[in-house]
Amino acid sequence: MYTGPSETKCYINGTLIGAMAYGFSSVTGQPLVIGAVKEGSTPQEYWSGSLDEVRIWNTIRTPEEIVENKDVSLLGNETGLMALFTFNQGTAGGTNTSETILLDKTASNNNGTLFNFTLTGSGSNYVSSPLTTAVSGTLPWTLGGNAGTTSSSSFLGTTDFRRLIFKTNNQERLTILPNGNVGIGTTSPGSAFTVKQQSNGIGIQLQAPDGDYSNNYLKFGTIPDFPFISSMWSNGRLDLSAGTDMFLFGNNIYLKGNAVINRLGDPTSQATSQSSGSMPFESNLWNGTAGVLTYAGIQNVASTTTALAHRLAFKLAATTTDLQNGLEAVSILSSGNVGIGIIDPKVKLAVNGDVKCVKLTVTATPWADFVFNSDYRLASLEQVERYIKDNKHLQDIPSVAEVNQKGIDIGTQQALLLQKVEEVTLYLIEQNKLIKQQQKEINQLKSQIKVSRK
């Protein structure tokens, strides 16, 4: 290959094996001899071997281009190809004495003349070619598979601003737009990947590799008017639908309704945006047996009151209308306070109603055992009596008015009640000592009376 001024390179199968400083000069009016060295007017030093698919280019071929085309027979219309001799007009090993003209397959028609060929038998004659024929154009692609291709020139696609189309039964099935968007079932995909179903049903299905198609899958599709996502893995299931028909999760839970978060009103309308919303669920039995329909709503409620702003409310109602207008069963404020039957809880847990439990543990400090310390000043019973007459309740114990207004701190109240019990215990101990002393004195007096009577 002549690659430049005074430089020639030799490639075998696309691999450079040598280069030398050897130039060529342009000669006109003289024939080109292939397979021999021409000294004067007579060819000499003939090539001992086979020739096939001789190509003459007016461009410098890259190693990749050499590898790409080395095993196929070109068509003659390739860019830069000035002459193509395929050696295909004779019969391999046959009598070809009439085939003395070697045809040029290009439009240049630079036909050659075979010189010193016997053209018969196993001598200097046509032989079978190991090359395959290119399908079309300059791309050496065949339906039986291809090797040695390069992405720069061997590809399926377009080189202008036109879409690529794949058809079956003469119908467009897959379209690739010039911008790269891919569409299945549509000629104008509006996203990177668009699938348009021709009817309701499954549009895309991802199947598990184990072949258990009934229990392991992920499906995307449409039911009438609404899209859905359905997945199944072993015994677990997740079905989601944007419509009013179903909203499913699991094997035994059936949820239903216009599911909207952060919106109130028509869930199919996006004309306005509101700061609150509800998501109702309809409970029922999985097997389809009719049950009592109860709507459970989860609602993010906006409020002009700072403490109530964006609280989370839980409601129960018989209908979705009642759900919107019904009372809140549970209210959770942004502060973390929880109210049951109370919209605005002022403490961590506020309950408007009775509470029943098996066990209740309250942590309170300090405990009341300080009453038994030696330096504890126990009020006299006279002081206790005066305090009760003046206040109508024990000292340190909240009054009826305080309980009605603030309620009772159970932990503190239990400690105060224990304090009073321990104080009463001390009073009883003192009373017991006094009783014993009085009994002793009584017994002494009785003994003196008996002596005096004698």
Image (cartoon, helix red, strand yellow):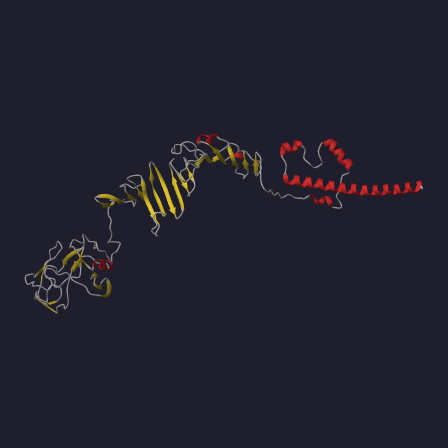
Where is residue 237, by image quadrant?
Answer: top left
Residue sitting farthest toward the left: 98
- In percent of width and height, residue 112 lies at 10, 60
Out of 152 and 167, give the one closest to the viewer.
167
Which residue occupies 33% across, 39% down? 222
In the rendered view, does 165 fall on the left or right side of 117? right
Q: Considering depth in this image, is 413 or 365 the residue closer to the camera? A: 413
Q: Position of residue 319 (x, y in %)?
A: 44, 31
Q: Quadrant of residue 263?
A: top left
Q: Which one is in front, 152 or 365?
A: 365
Residue 434: image quadrant is: top right
Tell me: 135 left or right of 206: left
Instruction: Report whether residue 377 is seen.
Output: no
Q: Residue at x 69, y 43 (%)?
A: 368
Kindly give the residue lying farthest to the front in the view shown: 454
Q: Identify which residue, 391 or 114, lies in the foreground.
A: 391
